[in-house]
């Protein structure tokens, strides 16, 4: 690899301790304003909303309409934050809405020409592709990479920071080893730089939090032993929680890969006792939240799946979400459009942003429609309760299938129920491990 792979200023930051802040259970809740404070014993932390909408460029309208739809948190990529800093500023200064900024460090693994222009504005964007299979970062390079990432997130008004992360394989993968070392340094740097402290000039001061970023392909989670080793390695890190992004994950992913992904995500959640945010997942994210995951971060009418292709831009039609089917009914042919029109006629939309029996007329209306219905559906499944998740999912799938049959659509994906079952197994396994450890 060329010697100029990393052109960053070194900084001296020691390794972090392996001990982190263990999040409390999700009981004894009380809500105070938009910050949604949680009290559990002597520790107070803020709960996550079930859906963290990742707003697109120039999506101020999604904040200003109805005073932000009651959102307590939004998501942004670093590219969006750099290209349009006004959205985060509006969220923080006017509405007191928290902002999660995803650093998207994995884009450094792409050739420069395949990255978004916004990402290249980040101070940690590299001048050439970073191949962590071949290139080992020095201590000073890792320290500088971490520091620049955190400083950029702070500058862009993040209240939820994410450690540097890249798309890697299982526990034996050199990329995974590098990411774990970067995460340990990020936890240490976050505290050393005092980034958690609320800003005194803020209208809505709030303590910042640090989540550990994880990106992996579902096929790399199929080995149960390697999967559980990954859980143990990440549980040993500090931080408030995790942002887990599984490449290509959606309801169309093969069931075996979905089960493996769900087992990893929920095992990490229950064994660490910390919050986990699923990044992407498309409509399958509803099943994760319904099964007990604290939160999902989704793009609104775009970016619903975590893809790592060239540029990361959306291709094809914008998704038109219909709540009755838990899926997009965007039409690419005349026959598909007719079928979607029949669906909207038989199952009118009550979002209030367009005629109930018609499609959203333009991108502005489409985003308002999507955000309204997505927020409603994620809040609804979050209220199911872990003990009722299987029963409620069976009932919801029956409702979807009835609507689908009447409008000529395929039935609900089998992956919806597979996630709920995998989540329950992970919960029971974590509980058994805890009881065994306590009794030994």
Image (cartoon, rainbow, N blue to C red):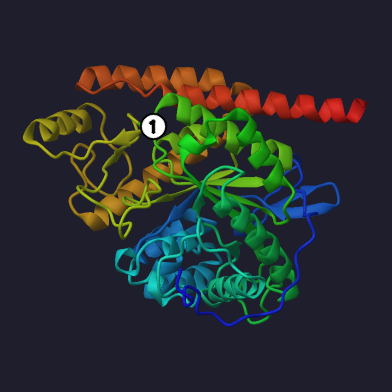
The residue at the far right in this view is 440
Q: Quadrant of residue 125?
A: bottom left
Would you name the residue on which mark 1 appears? 253
Task: Please state which of residues 6 and 13 is positioned toward the viewer in this rendering.
Answer: 6
Q: Specify whether 255 is left or right of 392.
A: left
Residue at (19% x, 54% y) in the render: 362
- Residue 165 lies, with reference to residue 374, above or below; the image says below
Q: Residue at x 74, y 70 (%)?
A: 191
Residue sitting farthest toward the left: 334
Q: Residue at x 50, y 79 (%)?
A: 7
In the rendered structure, the answer to whether residue 126 lies left or right of residue 265 reads left
Residue 242, x across and y down, in percent:
61, 50
User: x, y (%) of residue 203?
Assistant: 60, 76
Residue at image x 62%, y 77%?
202
Q: Is residue 59 above or below residue 272?
A: below
Decide which of 210, 7 is in the foreground and name it.
7
Q: Residues within 10 Å of mark 1 (few under 14, many from 20)?
A: some
**Residue 114, placed above or below residue 200:** above
Work out whether residue 352 or residue 78 is closer to the camera in this orientation and state it: 78
């Amino acid at each position: 690899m060329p010697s100029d792979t990393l052109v960053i200023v070194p900084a001296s930051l020691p390794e972090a301790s392996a001990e982190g802040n263990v999040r409390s259970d999700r009981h004894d809740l009380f809500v105070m304003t938009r910050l949604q404070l949680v009290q559990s014993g002597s520790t107070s932390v803020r709960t996550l909303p079930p859906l963290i909408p990742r707003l697109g460029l120039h999506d101020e309208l999604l904040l200003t309409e109805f005073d932000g739809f009651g959102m307590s948190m939004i998501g942004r990529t670093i590219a969006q934050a750099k290209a349009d800093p006004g959205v985060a500023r509006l969220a923080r200064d006017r509405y007191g809405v928290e902002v999660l900024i995803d650093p998207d460090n994995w884009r450094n693994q792409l050739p420069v020409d395949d990255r978004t222009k916004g990402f290249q504005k980040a101070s940690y964007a590299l001048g050439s592709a970073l191949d962590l299979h071949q290139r080992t970062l020095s201590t000073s390079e890792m320290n500088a990479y971490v520091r620049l990432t955190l400083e950029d997130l702070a500058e862009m008004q993040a209240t939820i920071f994410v450690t540097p992360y890249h798309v890697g394989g299982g526990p034996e993968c050199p990329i995974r080893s590098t990411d774990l070392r970067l995460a340990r340094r990020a936890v240490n740097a976050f505290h050393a730089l005092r980034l958690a402290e609320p800003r005194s000039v803020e209208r809505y001061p709030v303590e910042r939090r640090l989540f550990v970023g994880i990106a992996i392909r579902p096929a790399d989670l199929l080995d149960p032993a390697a999967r559980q080793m990954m859980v143990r390695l990440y549980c040993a890190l500090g931080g408030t929680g995790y942002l887990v992004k599984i490449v290509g994950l959606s309801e169309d992913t093969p069931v075996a890969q979905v089960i493996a992904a769900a087992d990893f995500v929920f095992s990490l959640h229950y064994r660490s006792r910390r919050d986990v945010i699923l990044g992407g997942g498309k409509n399958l994210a509803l099943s994760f939240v319904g099964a007990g995951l604290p939160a999902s971060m989704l793009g609104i009418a775009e970016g619903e799946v975590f893809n790592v292709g060239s540029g990361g831009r959306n291709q094809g039609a914008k998704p038109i979400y219909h709540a009755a089917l838990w899926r997009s009914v965007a039409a690419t042919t005349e026959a598909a459009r007719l079928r979607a029109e029949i669906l909207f006629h038989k199952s009118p939309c009550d979002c209030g942003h367009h005629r109930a029996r018609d499609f959203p007329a333009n991108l502005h209306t489409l985003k308002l429609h999507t955000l309204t219905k997505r927020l409603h559906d994620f809040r609804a499944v979050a209220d199911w309760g872990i003990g009722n998740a299987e029963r409620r999912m069976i009932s919801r799938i029956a409702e979807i299938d009835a609507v689908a049959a009447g409008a000529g659509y395929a039935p609900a994906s089998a992956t919806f129920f597979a996630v709920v079952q995998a989540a329950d197994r992970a919960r029971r396994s974590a509980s058994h491990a805890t009881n065994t450890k306590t009794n030994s």
